[in-house]
Amino acid sequence: MKSNLIYNEELLAGKTALVTGGASGLGRSIAVGLSQVGANVIIVSRQEEVLAKAAKEISDETDREVTYDVVDIRDIESVAQLSQRHENVDILVNNAGGQFPQKARDFTPNGWRSVIDLNLTGTWNMTQAFGNKMLEGVGGSICQIIATVGRGIPGIAHSASARAGVLELSRTLAFEWGPKVRVNCVAPGQFRTEAFDSTYEDGVGDGFVEQPLPNIGDVRDIANGVIFLVSPGARFITGEVLYVDGGLILQGPMSALPADGYPERE
């Protein structure tokens, strides 16, 4: 099947890429893109039935076999077992994550901890387990999917904190683990996915029409960014963040709650 991306179909031939949260949304698009450019793709998450269905669909779409495995990235033992089953991963894409919109003053300890555990600690668990394998072997590339951090994200302070932590973690590891392992981040802006529609209220994101590129992004834009950063074309790039956001980072804070969600500011 001819790739609908912008890269050579054999760009990552012979490489094994593991994508967390690869069964849906941005992760699925990343998995499709990596498969289309020749990588042997493994998608992982907690839901085996969803993974099996997605792996078959992606395989059919790309004419390349995509496999799957089950892991809870928050569970260090589950991650350790996953890394033992997949010894030779060249590319790790930490895409799994999630959050719920809420004012910071209303966070419960459990609500805060659940988002930090998934987005920051879970990412670290995967990064350490597979990064160590890369350091012990021939090296590799890690790409973290974060968010447009650096200007505040009202309504998801827990997730903004976790994603900013992943960014600084990645910059630190780029220094500690170079030159064998490159570590970069992709920061998506507004992308319409099933997860977005099921998480946020109507009206969230309406302000994105004011950004320099006034559109909601196509999930393939994220896949293209990831493919570049893990490819030989980015061999001299590490510790960087690629904003794929239509220029959203140039604006002020963009709320994850509707415009009328902060009556105390009126």
Image (cartoon, helix red, strand yellow):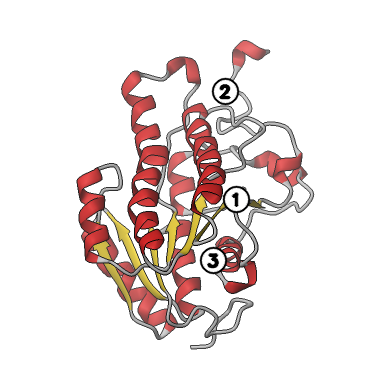
**SS at mark 3 in the image:** helix
Q: CA distance from mark 2 to mark 1?
A: 36 Å
Across and down, in percent, residue 182 comes to 53, 58
Q: Amino acid at mark 1?
A: Gly
Question: 207 and 140: which one is in front?
Answer: 140
User: Looking at the image, which residue is at 59% across and 31% down?
Assistant: 153
User: Looking at the image, which residue is at 55% across and 36% down?
Assistant: 164
| Crowd tier of the residue under label 1, counting other residues whose Cα lies within 10 Å: few below 14, some 14–19, many 20 or above | some
Q: Amino acid at mark 3?
A: Val
Where is mark 3, residue-wise? 230
Looking at the image, is mark 3 or mark 2 nearer the viewer?
3
Q: Which of pointers 3 and 1 lies earlier in the amino acid sequence?
A: 3
| Crowd tier of the residue under label 3, counting other residues whose Cα lies within 10 Å: few below 14, some 14–19, many 20 or above | many
Q: Is residue 22 visible?
A: no
Q: Amino acid at mark 2?
A: Gly
Quarter of the figure that contains the C terminus: top right
Looking at the image, is mark 2 or mark 1 nearer the viewer?
1
Across and down, in percent, residue 147 comes to 56, 43
**SS at mark 1 in the image:** loop
Q: Which of pointers 3 and 2 lies earlier in the amino acid sequence?
A: 3
Answer above or below: position of 51 versus 71. Answer: below
Image-quadrant location for residue 244: bottom right
Q: Is residue 250 visible?
A: yes
- Disc ID at residue 261: 2
Q: CA distance from mark 3 to mark 2?
A: 39 Å
Where is mark 1, residue-wise? 239
Answer above or below: position of 4 versus 178. Answer: below
Across and down, in percent, residue 105 comes to 48, 15
